[in-house]
Image (cartoon, coloured by chain):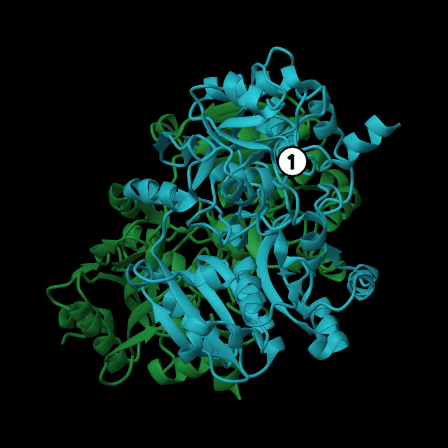
Chain colours: A cyan, B green
Amino acid sequence: MTSTTTIWDTIAAELNGIEIITDPTQLAKLSLDYYHFSPILEAQLKDKRGNLVVRPATEAEVMQVAKTCVKHKVPLTVRGAGTGNYGQCIPLEGGVILDTTKMNQIRWIKPGLACVEPGVRMAAFDKQAREIGWELRMAPSTYRTATIGGFIGGGSVGMGSITYGQLRDRGNLRALRVVTLEDEPRVIQLRGDEVQKVNHAYGTNGIITELEIPLAPAYPWAEIIVAFDEFMTAAQFGQALSDSDGIVKKMVSIHAWPIPSYFAALQSYLPQGKHCALLMVSETDLEPLQELVREYGGEITYNKTAQEASKGTSILEFTWNHTTLHARSVDPNLTYLQTFYFTLDRVEHMYHHFGDELAIHLEFLRFGGKAIPAGLQLFRFTTEERLNEIIRYHEENGTGIANPHTYILEDGGRKTIDPEQLAFKKLVDPYGLMNPGKMRAWSQMTND
Amino acid sequence: MTSTTTIWDTIAAELNGIEIITDPTQLAKLSLDYYHFSPILEAQLKDKRGNLVVRPATEAEVMQVAKTCVKHKVPLTVRGAGTGNYGQCIPLEGGVILDTTKMNQIRWIKPGLACVEPGVRMAAFDKQAREIGWELRMAPSTYRTATIGGFIGGGSVGMGSITYGQLRDRGNLRALRVVTLEDEPRVIQLRGDEVQKVNHAYGTNGIITELEIPLAPAYPWAEIIVAFDEFMTAAQFGQALSDSDGIVKKMVSIHAWPIPSYFAALQSYLPQGKHCALLMVSETDLEPLQELVREYGGEITYNKTAQEASKGTSILEFTWNHTTLHARSVDPNLTYLQTFYFTLDRVEHMYHHFGDELAIHLEFLRFGGKAIPAGLQLFRFTTEERLNEIIRYHEENGTGIANPHTYILEDGGRKTIDPEQLAFKKLVDPYGLMNPGKMRAWSQMTND
């Protein structure tokens, strides 16, 4: 080796035959995600870069990458499409970025279940699954580009959660194959509750190479917008629809004015000053939906059949964190919170308490068997102090905050250390090479 | 006419061309239902008989029957298969019994929706619907013989209610055609919320001649029995399964010992002294179900695939009010209550309060979006006073009793007069000929 040869050149050479990316522009792009929705994360993460990106196409190649990283004790960060918002896949300490998007084989699809590689894109998967009448149980608003493995690693809920709950709920992930970062990397298979060791762990404890996932019947999903004069009426309608066991739905998304004003492409369906509901409901259940809309005094302004909806942009892409995306394209100072309100009383309290400072955006989802309002409220960022005050006020009033302004696994949604995930990390990543700095439990243990 | 010619001979003659039954044995059989589960109803109803049974095969024939009954001002009582338990279709004042079982045409079945005549039997319907992957959203334990029209007229919940809620929930019945008992009978079509005018009205306000109903995806339903050492653990397991959004199920039925001892055909799967859960769960979700069973310390003693289950007697026929049927075949002094406990706390309270006097049988169902335990508890009948004391204690402690010991519509489940149903009855049955004595609102109005 000459003196200009770096460890990265060595690693690249050792991984000969596997696609490697070192071009700085590409490297920058493949080091980041949609962390910039948060001004806090923006400042913390914008300069973080991996040293090289590797794109294995098979599990055997993943094993090879794992072995090389362990040999050189360099960090390894796994990414899918990089559509997360918490810097889940941004390497804090550089190193190798393992991009899974070439591992995009669907192993099999049968009624109710499928087996895929992690890099399979969700919309592409559904296109095939729908041929036999099935689809993913849930997916984020980045459905068109997001990968299934990335959603398991970094996601938690999405469209479909109003029926199937959260990804972490028993039954929503069936089995995983993961490659370890031991001296001699191996494949571990996890089934049943064991999958929770790796589910939503930000890729800190094993490289997922295959997933078995449950499917949902693919209804013809009509896309509907309903306008309401009063925000709380819209919110109550959202709860009532979510609780309507006789109406099959996939998404119940409620937006306080002025959020609808941010949806440029939908302006003709969003009357000035009105609050709106963006819905996905089975076409066969439109008639009872219309009765419910009438009961709450709403006005249906947009009603696309599944067939029509499949041609243009889905209203999915105005909901969940796409709402924040549209808002920020109008005003880049806008950012957001993630809140489990649990009850409409708390929604109403916060609606009145914060007034114009916070624009409430609700997504209903099932939480332990009950439909609850969750929020991705928008507000203009001023200072970190004010952000923390807002969070504190929410927490003191009984809501649960899944803080989107931290890249630390435990500080986001769950708040507590997961001993099972930590134990599994000790086993599969004894050198702490996987996405270092993301799992607080590990950092605390190794600093002791 | 000779002096021995009765009005019934005249009516029979006027209905020439339509099947008429006057044989006393048949007349007795077709005048009754499974009212005898209640000793109170047994005493009140056992001698009630219609004067003739008519079996129209078309809506035109129904119109003819209606016109004749109005002309002669004789009572008309509509029945399906007579599998109800509250004397819904037992004629209190004699008259014509309209048996709908010859109106058994399926008009159409498409994904998610179907249109049928009232006399279509539920299991027979599903056999056809499953050919295109669909089935009824809910059905009673008398599924094999019960008719769809009868279930709408006299039923309220059943298997499937753990997902789709109650029949009365918006969306679970889409449209009806009903024939009126006006001087000139006509057909009225009801759609949307309007169907509630006739839904669960015991056939007091119009003769249903066609129904449009929503369907559910037909999963391969595995049938499972789980045994538990402690009753409350079984009950908690039932709630947990019902709240498991990631596990697709059709039935969650929990039985305190000694109820399992009444299930003769299942004895080898029901360990002595143990409490049990009878479940219908999607075959594709058995793995997460097994994890849940493990969490609650249950033991799976019976596990039939959908294929196997389709061959023998379904465990459905040991649940809902079939439980009572089996219990009474062992001890005819046993009778039952119907209770909305709403919470497990109330279940536990009643379990301890009544001890051996009441054997708790729970069926979980969705009620306004939440899974709740409902009960069809068994107890040995002593006196009407003690029965009423038991009911009163339940009501004073916050449970809702749907009293199965009354044939009065309002005194059963809903307790209150439904002004919409009363108004509709005034319109379609101005002479009060339909199933007289069943709707308290009407009786009170006409006695004023």
Residue B188 figure quarter:
bottom left
- Going 21% across and 56% down the picture, which residue do you hit? B108
Q: Quadrant of the C terminus of chain A?
A: top right
Give the amino acid type for the residue marked by disc 1 in the picture: Ala
Instruction: Point out residue A9 in the picture as x, y percentages from the top left corner.
Output: 56, 23
Instruction: Point out residue A187 in the picture as x, y percentages from the top left corner.
Output: 55, 17
Pointer 1 indicates a residue of which chain? A
Q: Quadrant of the N terminus of chain A?
A: top right
Q: Is residue A228 above or below residue A168?
A: below
- Going 46% across and 48% down the picture, which residue do you hit? B160
Q: Bin the neighbour count of mark 1 within 10 Å (Cα to Cα): few under 14, some 14-19, many 20 and up.
A: many
Q: Which of B427 and B385 lies nearest the eye of the viewer? A: B427
Residue sitting farthest toward the bottom: B448
Report which residue position mark 1 lands on.
Answer: A201
Residue A442 figure quarter:
top right
Q: Which of A247 and A233 lies nearest the eye of the viewer? A: A233
Give left or right: position of A245 versus A368.
Answer: left
Instruction: Point out residue B131 in the picture as x, y percentages from the top left corner.
Output: 24, 41
Q: Is residue A130 visible?
A: yes
Instruction: Point out residue A154 in the picture as x, y percentages from the top left corner.
Output: 60, 42
Q: Secondary structure at mark 1?
A: loop
Residue sitting farthest toward the top: A184
Q: Is residue B93 visible?
A: no
Q: Is residue B201 above or below residue A57?
A: below
